[in-house]
């Protein structure tokens, strides 16, 4: 490394200048003293340079002996960050509901709690930043410290010794922070109480295939939805604490919106808590940005992929029915064949959720049909629709008191304990830097 080569050159220069001063005929005691100190500095910096690799391996060895690892430490730190971020987002969701309801007193109280969470989050971010710098730049910090330590006339010796000490102490000490925290902290209270539950499940089409990014809405004696979330790529959704406070035993009605169409699923409603499957019997998702909406009474058979697209069989039980095709604007359909005959399908377009969607309908009478679609697909994106959360304002005072207790515990565990531990590491680094950078003084007679 170039820094070590330069440091070695400076150490030779320091030793040579020291020998020159010590052997000079100048009859001044302080000159002789400086000569001895510079010779000592040159030798000590040369020793540090030669043991550079050993110092790096020493840190890994100490971590192995102490049973700590950076991987576990980063995982522990990330978990705590996730907890705080989730809590903060939950506070914002509740604040939006309180603002809309006009509960200004509760809103101010919630802002106070949110500030405590934000303070704890800032502390965790600081620890995370320090950890990333130490983990990624430890070797460079150590090399730069050795270089400054080697400068003649002790110009950068104290700073260099501090950098050497920090690279060693912090690299070994930071992964031990979880063990330090576990000694002094008690189990953190949960902000979720037994009074609240959630509605969790997966949205599937008529044949049980998961639908990507469904919009699940909840209704409760109202025309407008009281809650709305966008599910995941595999159709999974979750509505409940900490973002939504759904009282146990309350019954909510479901509605699913997919590609701009509002569909009633089966089951149509559920009592909290609930987990299960929401099936859309009027939707058949063919994959790659293509779906069909079934209007009428159908009997469906599992679709099969072909080299050019997809084909499926269906039976129309009602006297007549409509098979509506929905596709993303980027999906290219070459042809739609119904019983090997090209269907007369006129496409109309509309916008929904930040997507351009096209649709066309094919009318069918009673009978059995083989439908074949030749197309090139595209990934179905997440719709640009904001989640809406539900909070029962009548129960929010009890919830906020529980949240405040939890947040105070977060403040202790996520701010005070890490800050105290960093102070301990800083004090240890200072002590080690004093030892490295001049703890010994030679008396010249």
Image: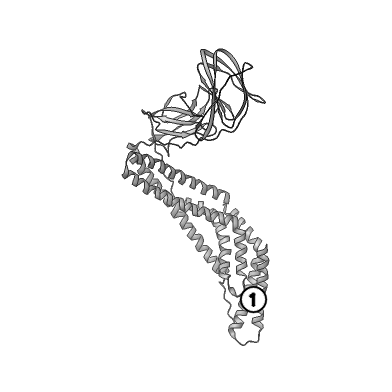
Residue sitting at x 66%, y 83%: 23
In the displayed structure, 109 sits above or below 30; it is above
Q: Secondary structure at mark 1?
A: helix
- Nearest the viewer among 199 and 348 is 348
- Give how far across and how far down residue 242 sits, in percent: 42, 39
- Give how far across and how far down residue 103 sits, in percent: 32, 41
How many callouts does the rendering have? 1
In which quadrant is the N terminus drawn? Answer: bottom right
- Give how far across and how far down residue 33 sits, in percent: 60, 81
- Give how far across and how far down residue 193 sits, in percent: 39, 38
In the displayed structure, 339 sits above or below 163; it is above
In the rendered image, which residue does mark 1 sit on? 39
Q: Residues within 10 Å of mark 1 (few under 14, many from 20)?
A: many
Residue sitting at x 49%, y 54%: 126
In which quadrant is the C terminus drawn? Answer: bottom right
- Nearest the viewer among 84 and 233 is 233
- Nearest the viewer among 440 and 323 is 323
Q: Is residue 381 visible?
A: yes
């Amino acid at each position: 490394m170039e820094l070590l080569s330069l440091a070695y050159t400076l150490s030779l220069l320091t030793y040579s200048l020291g020998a020159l001063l010590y052997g000079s005929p100048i009859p001044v005691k302080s000159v002789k003293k400086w000569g001895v100190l510079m010779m000592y500095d040159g030798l000590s910096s040369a020793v540090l340079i030669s043991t550079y690799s050993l110092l790096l391996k020493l840190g890994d060895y100490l971590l192995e002996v102490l049973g700590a690892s950076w991987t576990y430490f980063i995982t522990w730190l990330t978990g705590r960050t996730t907890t705080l971020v989730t809590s903060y987002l939950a506070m914002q969701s509740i604040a939006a509901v309180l603002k809309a309801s006009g509960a200004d007193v509760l809103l101010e109280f919630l802002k106070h709690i949110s500030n405590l969470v934000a303070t704890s989050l800032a502390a965790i971010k600081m620890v995370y930043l320090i950890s990333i710098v130490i983990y990624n730049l430890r070797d460079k910090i150590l090399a730069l410290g050795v270089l400054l330590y080697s400068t003649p006339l002790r110009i950068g010796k104290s700073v260099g010794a501090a950098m050497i000490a920090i690279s060693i102490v912090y690299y070994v000490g930071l992964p031990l922070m979880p063990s330090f925290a576990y000694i002094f902290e008690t189990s953190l209270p949960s902000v979720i109480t037994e009074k609240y539950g959630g509605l969790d499940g997966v949205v599937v089409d008529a044949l049980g295939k998961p639908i990507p990014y469904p919009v699940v809405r909840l209704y409760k004696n109202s025309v407008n939805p009281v809650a709305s979330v966008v599910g995941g790529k595999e159709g999974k959704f979750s509505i409940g604490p900490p973002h939504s406070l759904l009282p146990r035993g309350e019954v909510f009605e479901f509605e699913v919106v997919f590609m701009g169409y509002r569909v009633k699923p089966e089951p149509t409603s559920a009592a909290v808590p609930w987990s299960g499957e929401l099936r859309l019997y009027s939707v058949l998702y063919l994959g790659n940005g293509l779906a069909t909406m079934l209007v009428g009474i159908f009997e469906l058979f599992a679709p099969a992929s072909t080299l050019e697209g997809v084909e499926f069989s269906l039976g129309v039980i009602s006297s007549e029915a409509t098979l509506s095709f929905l596709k993303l604007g980027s999906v290219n359909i070459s042809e739609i064949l119904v019983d090997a005959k090209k269907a007369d399908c006129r496409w109309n377009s509309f916008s929904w959720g930040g997507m351009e969607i096209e649709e066309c309908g094919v009318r069918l009478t009673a009978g059995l049909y083989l439908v074949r679609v030749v197309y090139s697909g595209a990934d179905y994106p997440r719709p640009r629709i904001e989640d809406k959360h539900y909070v029962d304002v009548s129960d929010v005072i009890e919830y906020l008191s529980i949240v405040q207790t939890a947040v105070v515990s977060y403040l202790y565990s996520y701010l005070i304990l890490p800050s105290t531990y960093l102070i301990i590491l800083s004090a240890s680094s200072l002590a080690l830097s004093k030892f490295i950078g001049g703890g010994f003084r030679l008396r010249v007679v």
